[in-house]
Image: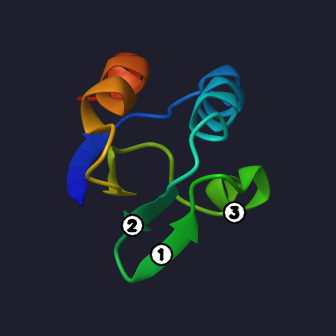
Amino acid sequence: MKTVKIDLGSIDKVKSFVNDVTKFDCDFDLVSGRYVIDAKSIMGIFSLDLSKPIDLTIHSDDNIDEIMEVLGKYTV
């Protein structure tokens, strides 16, 4: 498991992010304050405050390098 900060400040970034995370078999959670949202849920993401960076928790240890390479454009 790994946690990184990401920035999803625009609608296009959110769409692209959801498309990227759905390519992987593992679970992803977005944590904003006391809210924990499934990162593969576009509706859930839009319920968060996207004006500031959000914590992304990746529930995988197998292909973490590949995941970080794909999600690198969102990290802060």
Q: Secondary structure at mark 1?
A: strand
Q: Quadrant of the C terminus?
A: top left
Query: Which quadrant of the view contains residue 19?
Result: top right
Mark 1 to mark 2: distance in Å?
A: 5 Å
Residue drawn at 72 percent across, 56 percent down: 41
Q: Residue furthest front?
A: 62
Viewer-side residue, 10 vs 41: 41
Q: Amino acid at mark 3?
A: Gly
Name the mark on residue 31.
2
Mark 1 to mark 3: distance in Å?
A: 9 Å
Instruction: Say whether marks 3 and 2 touch (CB < 8 Å).
Output: no
Instruction: Say whether marks 1 and 3 touch (CB < 8 Å).
Output: no
In primary-sequence order, the first of circles 1 and 2 is 2
Image position of 22 (left or right of 75):
right
In primary-sequence order, the first of circles 3 and 2 is 2
In primary-sequence order, the first of circles 1 and 3 is 1
Q: Secondary structure at mark 3?
A: helix
Q: Secondary structure at mark 2?
A: strand
The crowd level at tag 3 (other Cα within 10 Å; few <14, some 14-19, many 20+) is: few
Measured as percent of width and height from the top left, residue 16 is found at: 65, 23
Q: Name above or below for residue 64 compared with residue 71.
A: below
Residue drawn at 69 percent across, 63 percent down: 44
Viewer-side residue, 64 vs 17: 64
Measured as percent of width and height from the top left, residue 61 is found at: 26, 52
Name the mark on residue 36.
1
